[in-house]
Amino acid sequence: MRSFGVNELIFIVSAARWTIALSVVAFLGGAAGGLLVALARTGTISPLRYAMIAYIKLFQGTPLLMQLFLAFFGPNILGFNVDPWAAAALGLTLNASAFLGEIWRGCIQATPKGQWEAATALGLRYMPLMRFVVLPQAFKIAIAPTTGFLVQLIKATSLASIIGFVELTRAAQVINNATYRPFLIFGIVALIYFAMCWPLSIFSRRMEQKLAVAAR
Amino acid sequence: MNYVFQFGDVFNAWDELALGAWLTVRLSALSMIFGLVVAIFGALGKLSGPKPVRWAIDAYIEVIRNTPFLIQLFMVFFGLPAIGVRLDADQAALLAMVINVGAYATEIVRAGIESIKKGQIEAGRALGLKSMQIFRYVVLLPAIRTVYPALTSQFILLMLNSSVCSAIAASELTAAANDIQSRTFRSFEVYFVVTAIYLAMSFAFSGVFAAIERLFLSRPGKA
């Protein structure tokens, strides 16, 4: 049996870059998708609105692990061969789009009605109305819950280990299988996740309090 | 696309899937009940315990909420035996789920208790209620009523999250799916059907939670 040394530690710590990479890709993809979902969900085109409600319900009502499995095995059926990295990125992006879409829908709808009416009265069409009036205000409200969701997303990337993508959790399993020091290894990994997530959680809470004070 | 879908193998294993679904429901329901108990004590400790207790509860909440459930599960399943506590996969899954949901639910219940106005407690005291009665009828029940939507959506998330327990081969729906998959190689079909079952279960849980609210949590005279 191998012992747990510096090399093993370096292997684990350097695998954190894949956790970060996956989080960033899924967040950016989810932000793009989420914006479209939120706009369609708050828009006036009924079929699109219902489609988005169904999309959100589907992704919020099923386990992320199943979504990752389907993202892994589904493209194969269509003739695309995806590796675990692409499958994880695809699954997490679709998942994040649904959650961010629902969060941002709330933020868009939370901008006071008077703002919409005033902008419409000024003759602004949909695009400038969104671009210059609604979204900037919604953005401020969205910072706290979006950061909160980013924490969820970083933790969620650990599930990519189950479909075989070597990120932080998978690296820990590999090293644990070779050295069998579970407490130490998963403790270190928990600490790394904590170091990534906790500052974001604190930031999110601060923003929330700031907004609550501003609203008072 | 020249793939031929074959759902036959999956539907032939309906008994395994039904058992798996039942085990997921049981595992989730038990975790919810124990998790709520943890949350009530956690919230009480955080609001009225001595400082060290409050710090310990804060640390518990922050650690659990900022680390992945999968790592918590591995800690319980692989870590505890290293210090002499041996659990089988099902016990480890239940324990990890209770620890996990307990942290989230503690914060939710705390928010509920904090929303109770002081005057309400004083009114209870003026009516001559004993402190246990005050806690039960004046504080806890209205608190839970207030945060019920947040609490139940957390519980549904927990049910969905229980699929992660398949990683340690605990007996539940996803593990059943993995078994069928490795036997039939109908990966997409199996997980597609199982995803549909999870969706149905999350709707069913929503329905049950709504029924519980109507039956037990509606305000007297308002129902």
Image: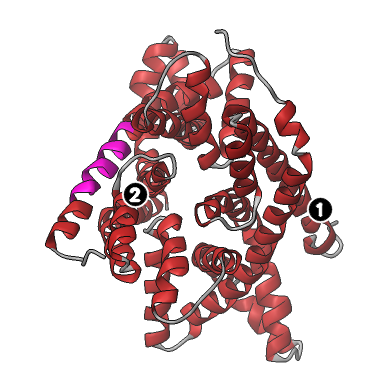
Tag nearer the camera, 1 or 2? 2
* Residue carrying label 1: B211
Q: Quadrant of the N terminus of chain B?
A: top right
Q: Amino acid at mark 1?
A: Ala
x and y percentages locating residue A90 in the rendered image: 41, 28
Residues drawn in magenta = A14-25
The structure residue drawn at horizontal position 58% and vertical position 26%, both measured from the top left corner, is A55
| Residue B215 in the image, given as x and y percentages of width and height | 84, 59
| Left or right, B80 with reference to B14 | left
Q: Residues within 10 Å of mark 2 (few under 14, many from 20)?
A: many
Name the residue carrying label 2: A170
Give the x, y percent position of residue A146.
38, 41
Q: Amino acid at mark 2?
A: Arg
* Element carrying mark 1: helix
**Dot 2 lies on which element?**
helix
Residue B181 occupies quadrant: top right
Chain of the residue where label 2 is placed in the rendered structure: A
For residue B168, the mark is none
